[in-house]
Image: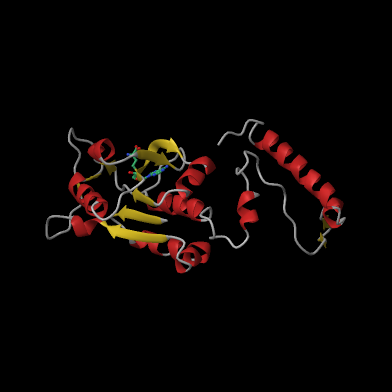
Amino acid sequence: MRIDILTGLPKLLESPLQESILRRAQEKGKVEIVIHDLREFAHDKHKTIDDTPYGGGAGMILKPEPIFECVESLGSQRSYDEVILLTPDGEPFSQRVANELSLKANVMLICGHYKGVDERVREALATRSVSIGDYVLTGGELAAAVIVDAVVRLVPGVLNDTESALSDSFQDGLLGAPQYTRPAEYRGLNVPDVLLSGNHSEIEEWRQQQRFARTKSRRKGNYSS
Ligand code: SAM
């Protein structure tokens, strides 16, 4: 899988994509993540990528030209399954969307900044708009990092133990069960006896009960991805 990220602030993405599982996934060749600096597509010597909004108002808007030209340059090299605009008013990101994206070959993520992105980017370039939650970030870079992280760990062969992705919260519509490790007793806090019993069917049954109970109480019983 290849993921291209378009941003005016590439440095914001360097560290989150170069650690832990994301770094390993790239080293193993399971995923290629390429960051594109929109300023390289600016037309003036100051590398301007934003401008004031038509109609007045606060904040600067990312200009269409650098984004169109970057997307077109990438699109002439390969075909993209999705061109995703990151925006707070987009489709909510979820485990379902992460699963869907993890099956794609080429995905582009467009990060906005400042007051937002010229609407013509959404109209003419984006195949979908995605939000990581009902709150406003300074820019799309952290949203892109969240999406890349959630998607890449689902790409086959990225996690050593695929079971650990399959048994995570949301994969089957339920929250995860509580997890414990050694010691069995710590500061008077005990690991549930069933987990120490060695009885695998009872452990599985307990975990499922915990998952249903947690989903019921924390997601009002109707979690939907
Ligand atoms: N003026 C915009 C609005 O009212 O919806 C907010 C712009 S925000 C300050 C700047 C950029 O951050 C957006 O263009 C988007 O790319 C990104 N962003 C902010 N919050 C986001 C979220 N919840 N999900 C995805 N991207 C987000």
Residue 120 figure quarter: top left
Location of the C terminus by quadrant is: top right
Q: Residue furthest left?
A: 44
Residue found at x 77% / y 40%: 209
Which is more toward the observer, 205 or 53?
205
Q: Position of residue 123 (x, y in %)?
A: 26, 35
Q: How is the image coloured?
A: secondary structure
Q: Residue furthest bottom?
A: 27
Which is more toward the observer, 222 or 102?
102
Left or right: 204, with 32 as reference point: right
Residue 204, can we see it?
A: yes
Residue 13, compared with residue 50, is above or below; it is below
Left or right: 111, with 61 as reference point: right
Residue 58, can we see it?
A: no
Q: Position of residue 92 (x, y in %)?
A: 46, 37
Residue found at x 18% / y 32%: 55
Residue found at x 65% / y 31%: 220
Give the tally of numbered discs: 0
Residue 41, compared with residue 84, is above or below; it is below
Location of the N terminus by quadrant is: bottom left
Q: Position of residue 214 (x, y in %)?
A: 70, 39
Quadrant of the displayed image that contains ligand 1 = top left
Residue found at x 65% / y 42%: 175
Q: Position of residue 88 (x, y in %)?
A: 39, 39
Which is more toward the observer, 132 or 106?
106
